Amino acid sequence: MIAFLGLGRMGAPMARRLVAAGHQLTVWNRTPKHVEGALAAADPAEAVAGARIVVTMLRDPEAVLSVLEEAKPAPGTLVIEMSTIGPAAVARLRRLLPGGVGLVDAPVLGSTAPAQDGTLTVLAGGTPDDLARCEELLKVFGTVRIAGGPGAGAALKIAVMNTIVPAQVLVAETLAYADSLGVDRGLLLDVLAETPVAPVVARLRPALAERPATRYALGLAAKDLALAPSPVLSLAGAALARLESAVAAGEAEADLTAILGLPGGPPAVQKINPASVPATNGHYSHATRAGGLLFVSGQVALDEDDRVIAPGDMRAQAEVVLRNVGAILADQGLTFGQVTHIRTFVTDMSQLRAYGEVRAPYFPVPPASTTVEVSRLFRDGLVIEVEVVAAAS
């Protein structure tokens, strides 16, 4: 028995291929959907009960982690994670799963038509034993490429997406630039079609005639680029800014090719969530960048599993907090020397000396500073929170 969790644009046709290949399937989707020939479960736990293999095809890392935490696969089960969540989330997932549960990260390349036809490219990472358990099953979806050990498939997928998505955004920017010069779009595309970017042109050209059906949602493309470490320091970062602007304009569910018809330029406020610091809970961003300023949210000592580090220990938590601040600054190409103001919240002013000793090496010449004692922070055991503003240009 196989449990398939997630029946979106890609998940539904992939589930149907498993049924067509003769597999017994139980499916679950947050919004109930029907797959002919498969049993439907009311929740993830019901779906995985008795399953030897669990396949996940969900939107983002938090969805995968929360669904599998609810599902609680039993020892002996093999989880095949086929969403695009990045290697850091795969590592978090490995820590979440009980001992005795196997894990293969196997994101796919291709859109809805290849998912229906079984011509996807599957990028698989895992231990040799886990990969051997599922390689034949993965061939139902298309060509399987073994990327390496645990997390290797997820890492390869992010590397690929950081090439092909910016390439499409670049062509869109080029067309807009050509318009400003009076260059004929059709002629430009004909010339580009004779260059190494010909496959990108072939993908985008139909979008100039009409708005295509969504194969790869623009919002998912933005999510995929944001999974890469330090995206804003690269061409991929510029593409991400353009996609985030389109998402803010309400185009998240449009096909990625819709970027051709949207105005360019980065958003007035850029939201920043580097992979170099533990993920947020989704209700805030680690930093925002507007004009020439970077605003870093209050940083606290939480680990990747959202647990308090060194409860009650001012010195240990201060070290974690300032490392996180430094990682966010570095992600933007900045240093502590560009911090204009630092605001600190502590639960016990008598421990301020320990914090000051940790902080001093980071700020040989101190910036403007505010320190406030508060009765408590948002999580028991936290004793310090630090936010900064930095000059970003």
Image: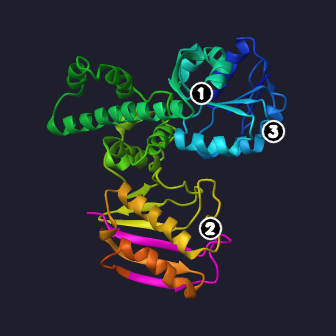
Give the quarter of the image for residue 71: top right
Q: Nearer the viewer, mark 3 or mark 1?
A: 3
SS at mark 2? Answer: loop
Q: Residues within 10 Å of mark 2 (few under 14, many from 20)?
A: some
State the mark number for residue 10: 1
SS at mark 3? Answer: helix
Vertical position of residue 104 compared to residue 145: above or below: below
User: Tag count in the figure?
Assistant: 3
Residues under numbered marks 3 and 1 in contact, where contact means CB atoms less than 8 Å apart? no
Three-letter amino acid code at the position of disc 2: Ala
- Looking at the picture, tell me which residue is in the foreground, 140 or 195: 140
Vertical position of residue 323 compared to residue 68: above or below: below
Q: Is residue 359 left or right of residue 293?
A: right
Q: Residue furthest top?
A: 21
For marks 2 and 1, the one nearer the N-term is 1
Residue 342: image x %, image y %? 41, 76
Seen at 44% across and 49% down, the residue is 249
The answer for how far apart the CA atoms under marks 3 and 2 are is 33 Å
For marks 3 and 1, the one nearer the N-term is 1
Residue 171: image x %, image y %? 29, 32
**Magenta-span inclusion, residue 376:** yes
Vertical position of residue 136 compared to residue 29: above or below: above
State the mark number for residue 45: 3
For marks 3 and 2, the one nearer the N-term is 3
Residue 183: image x %, image y %? 16, 31
**Magenta-span inclusion, residue 214:** no
Three-letter amino acid code at the position of disc 1: Met
The answer for how far apart the CA atoms under marks 3 and 1 are is 22 Å
Q: Which residue does the numbered mark 2 point to in the structure image?
A: 310
The region drawn magenta spans 369-393
